[in-house]
Image (cartoon, helix red, strand yellow):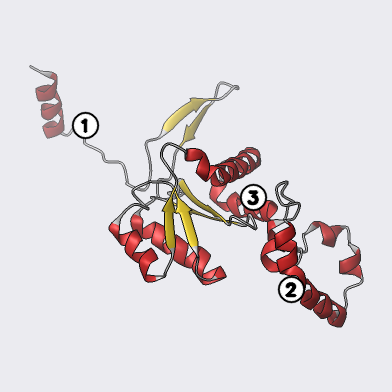
Amino acid sequence: MSNGQGVDKLLEAGFIQEISYPKWLASVVLVRKASGKWRMCVDYTDLNKRKFLIVSIDYFTKWVEAEPVAQITEQKMRDFVWKFIICRFGLLHILISDNGHQFDNACFREFCLELGIDHCFTSVAHPQANEKTEVTNRTILQGLKIRLDQSKGQWVEDLYNVLWAYRTTFRVPTGETPFNLTYGMEAVIPLEIELPSPRVECYDADSSATQLRSNLDLIEQTREAA
């Protein structure tokens, strides 16, 4: 009798039964602890489906937008450009991307054409043309790696903390923060609440409004200097 026949007979007799794992739960893994006891580990597959990261960076201000996604598709790229860039900052003049299929397709080309966006590809022979985005990606990933040791793998939740830190930190190429070059003012960071800075302690609505108008008048000069 083959093994298969033996299993069939046991199934028919009711000594064993077939089981199926739920789709929302991965296989259970048993791990022995240092104490000698066993720990049962499971992975909830419906959670944390987002394992890819879409990143964009503004060439001049170095402002970064990023979105975690489960899959990088043509539609996802269209949605990202629309929601995270156009709806927040207005239409683009030029969009530079790699040669991935999510960009190089009729659907995305039509999207850019309808909105008057000049879509350019980095040369396959010269991938360094997309170096700014690659450097930014490494910075974000490094920030995530540091925080993952504390958050036990919740990278999606920590992504926005990393982005906040990136946007409010002075960048070497410009000598300014991306936040300042984008909005014409520096963001009030949590540290200024814990250790009050002069602009927090001496805040006055009228003088603040005057200063903001002055900053906006000078923003173009600040950007040119950067």
- Assign the N terminus to one quadrant of the image: top left
Horizontal and vertical percent for residue 34? 59, 22
Residue carrying label 3? 162
- The disc, 1 or 3, on the residue closer to the chain's N-terminal end is 1
Horizontal and vertical percent for residue 113? 36, 66
Q: Residue at x 47, y 53 (%)?
A: 96
Horizontal and vertical percent for residue 124? 41, 39
- Discs 1/3, front: 3
The label on residue 89 is: none
Front-lying residue, 208 or 162: 208
Q: Residue at x 45, y 28 (%)?
A: 30
The vertical placement of 84 against 21, above or below, is below
Q: Is residue 19 left or right of residue 61?
A: left
- The disc, 2 or 1, on the residue closer to the chain's N-terminal end is 1
Residue carrying label 1? 16
Secondary structure of the residue carrying numbered label 2: helix
The vertical placement of 115 against 226, above or below, is below
Tag 3: residue type? Val
